[in-house]
Image (cartoon, grey):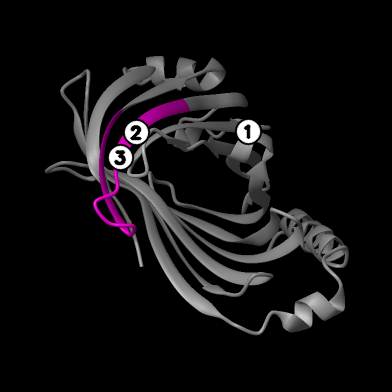
């Protein structure tokens, strides 16, 4: 491994370990003896956008652990209906509670599409912000030393006991450009969605919604040069389920 990459990964690991040492008291950690498995598909949906494009999108994760420590496997992506895989990634993360409603996570991310494929070291935080806004934030260091980041946030508004309106937003940014992947420096893109789901069962809920995506800055310029649209508006339908 290149020396600069080793330094970046070692720095991420050192930061993670130092934050772990600031976690809950040892007695509380020792009390965390019950481990559980859970799988949840937050998004499992069909989208039709304003350019007549049709895709299948997913955002799911599985975890095993207790209240203080978890091992997470996350995946998200997009596949054209009747076509090829457009985006796909997976993350394997160790998660540790560091304060009330806040987890520290670190691990590895692998992108399978688009090409060229990339691998990343990951360190991030997830939890619950004021007003019950759930968020996830992460910094990524690629195998070539490029640094990028992602912020996701969502809120659940209970219209009734079963009918739930869920706005969500995602922002991606990078410190340097990666022309091979069509991404520039600065804020790369923003995605905002609104989903209305009905819980037929506590573990199963169909939903309908809309989703808007917009490339920004240098990434938008690269998209224009490649004759790609900078913005998409999609109608969607899918199911949210867990077990």
Q: Nearer the viewer, mark 3 or mark 2?
A: 3
Q: At which x and y percent is residue 242? A: 36, 61
CA distance for labels 1 and 3: 33 Å
Label 1 or label 3, whichever lies nearer to me, is 3
Q: Does residue 90 appear left or right of residue 93 in this picture?
A: left
In the image, 190 versus 186, the foreground residue is: 190
| Residue 146 in sight from this viewpoint | no
- Percent position (x, y) of residue 168? 47, 33
Q: Which residue is mark 2?
A: 195
What span is in magenta?
A: 191-209
Residue at the spot x=69%, y=79% of the render? 32
Q: Which residue is rendered at x = 56% and y = 81% of the image?
A: 35
Disc 1 crowd rating (10 Å Cα; few below 14, some 14-19, many 20+) is some
Q: Position of residue 51 (x, y in %)?
A: 20, 19
Against 25, residue 74 (above or below) is above
Q: Is residue 142 left or right of residue 6?
A: left
Q: Are marks 2 and 1 in contact (CB under 8 Å)?
A: no
Q: Determine whether 151 is above or below 220 in the image.
A: below
Q: Quadrant of residue 185?
A: top right
Q: Position of residue 70 (x, y in %)?
A: 60, 70
- 10 Å crowding of disc 3: few (<14), some (14-19), many (20+): many
Q: Quadrant of the C terminus?
A: bottom left
Residue at image coords 31%, 17%: 227
> Residue beneath label 1, please?
174
Residue that numbered label 3 is attached to = 197
Q: Earlier in the sequence, mark 2 or mark 1?
A: 1
Q: Residue furthest left?
A: 82
Q: CA distance from mark 2 to mark 1?
A: 28 Å
Q: Quadrant of residue 212?
A: top left
């Amino acid at each position: 491994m290149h020396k600069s990459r080793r330094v970046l990964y070692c720095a991420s690991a050192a930061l993670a370990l130092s934050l772990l040492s600031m976690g809950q008291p040892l007695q509380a950690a020792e009390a965390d003896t019950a481990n559980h498995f859970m799988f949840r598909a937050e998004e499992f949906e069909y989208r039709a956008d304003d350019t007549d494009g049709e895709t299948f999108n997913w955002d799911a994760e599985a975890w095993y652990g207790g209240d203080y420590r978890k091992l997470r496997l996350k995946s998200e992506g997009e596949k054209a209906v009747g076509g090829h895989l457009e985006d796909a990634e997976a993350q394997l993360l160790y998660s540790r509670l560091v304060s009330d409603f806040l987890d520290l996570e670190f691990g590895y991310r692998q992108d399978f599409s688009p090409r060229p494929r990339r691998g990343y070291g990951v360190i991030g935080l997830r939890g619950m912000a004021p007003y019950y806004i759930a968020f996830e934030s992460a910094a990524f260091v690629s195998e070539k030393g490029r640094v990028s980041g992602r912020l996701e946030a969502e809120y659940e508004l209970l219209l009734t006991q079963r009918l739930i309106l869920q706005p969500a937003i995602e922002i991606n940014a990078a410190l340097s450009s990666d022309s091979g992947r069509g991404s520039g420096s600065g804020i790369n893109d923003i995605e905002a969605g609104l989903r209305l789901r009905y819980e037929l069962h506590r573990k199963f809920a169909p939903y309908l919604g809309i989703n808007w995506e917009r490339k920004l800055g240098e990434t938008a310029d690269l998209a224009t040069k490649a004759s790609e649209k900078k913005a998409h508006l999609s109608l969607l339908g899918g199911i949210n389920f867990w077990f």
